[in-house]
Image (cartoon, grey):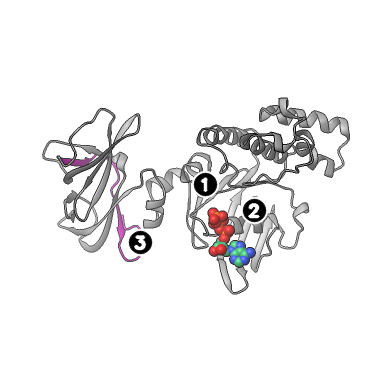
Amino acid sequence: MAEVQLVDVEKRYGEFLAVPKQSLTIEEGEFLVLLGPSGCGKTTTMRMIAGLEDITAGDLMIAGERANDKPPKDRDIAMVFQNYGLYPHMTVAENIGYPLKLRGMDRKSRDARVLETAQKVELDALLKRRPSELSGGQRQRVALARAIVRTPKIFLMDEPLSNLDAKLRVTMRAELKHLHHELGVTTVYVTHDQMEAMTLASRVAVMREGRIVQLDTPKKIYSEPADLFVAGFIGSPSMNLVEGRITGGRFEAPGVSLPVTAADRDGVVMGVRPEDLQLTTDGSAAVSGKLYALELTGDSTLVTLRDRTTSICARGPADFEAPIDAPCSLAPKPGVRIHLFDKTSGQRID
Ligand code: ATP
């Protein structure tokens, strides 16, 4: 049975349509990530599931029951927010144990459960401190511990890692992934960080202007983006996108020429990922231009070629060196996917 189902759900704030009519099924045990730029409606969608926002139209089903009018406390949901929402006057232990206290669990069982949970997120040494005496990362872990202290039906997480430094984000990402594996609780997670989405999700719903534009596994979203928006949003550095035409079985644009399988047409955008291109010195060049910039990332070098109309980035070997402005050629690696989109509609054509 699907754990959460949105059926033609719509949200208006007065006249403003924040989330146009949409349907979404979240399977039991799934880790579903809502991904999209600021203002696309991720938080609104999540808050409707939590019961913190009225639903203007449509049905919200939780475990097969209509939940539109169910108060948040009766939905068996635990939430983690970006700003933690900790109680400043309570200790770490009291914060973590609060959901158990609300449910009337006795002191002794509560203490045992709090300790066990704190150990999971490595907070057991800090149980007596107050939130003001903790670092951002520690506060974040308290919020997480408070959410997992009991096993709810659903976890809702809204950018829970966004206040952490880069290193801690990566560590906590692995913690979340492990936790999901361990507990198997249906999770809905909001982020604008595509890397977070790709690494955590069972499925990603990419949102734009209130609508889900693609709902797929991370692998599929990466290898087969449904449109230009998703193609440009997923991947770092992002996919190279070049406008041109297909003629005689080749995609042609200034400085770019490569074989494709689609039929001849104008108004095409070709997409190729930087990691799918390689430097070449033989006659197989698909892209020719002048070297514009080299950026060493550690395990590779980002090579950017640029002319008046086109800029193309390739991921080359770490030891690649050449003078700026030197002529340079790139070719797709054998067997990689060349993406083709309709320039006007933005939809994938191949
Ligand atoms: P962010 O990543 O910036 O948090 P988001 O994708 O979560 O963005 P939402 O917070 O869901 O976006 O907002 C969706 C749209 O609804 C935005 O255009 C926003 O301005 C609007 N909106 C959100 N809350 C309200 C409100 N209470 N009243 C009016 N408009 C609102």
Vertical comparison of 294 with 158: above or below: above
Vertical comparison of 44 with 324: above or below: below
Badge number at residue 311: none
Q: Which residues are magenta?
A: 327-350
Residue 23 in view, yes or no: no
Q: Which residue is mark 2?
A: 4
**The one of 32 and 79 positioned closer to us in this rendering:** 79
Q: Residue at x 49, y 39 (%)?
A: 199
Q: Amino acid at mark 1?
A: Arg
As for residue 270 lying within the magenta part, the answer is no
Q: Residues within 10 Å of mark 2 (few under 14, many from 20)?
A: many
Q: Earlier in the sequence, mark 1 or mark 2?
A: 2
Label 1, label 2: how far apart the Cα atoms are:
14 Å
Q: Quadrant of ligand 1?
A: bottom right
Vertical comparison of 299 with 146: above or below: above
As for residue 345 lying within the magenta part, the answer is yes
Q: Which residue is mark 3?
A: 346
Q: Which residue is mark 1?
A: 203
Side of 78 where 42 appears, left or right: left
Q: Secondary structure at mark 3?
A: loop
Q: Residue at x 35, y 29 (%)?
A: 298
**The one of 169 and 54 positioned closer to us in this rendering:** 169
Cβ atoms at labels 3 and 2 below 8 Å apart: no
Label 1, label 3: how far apart the Cα atoms are:
22 Å
Q: Amino acid at mark 3?
A: Gly
Cβ atoms at labels 1 and 3 below 8 Å apart: no
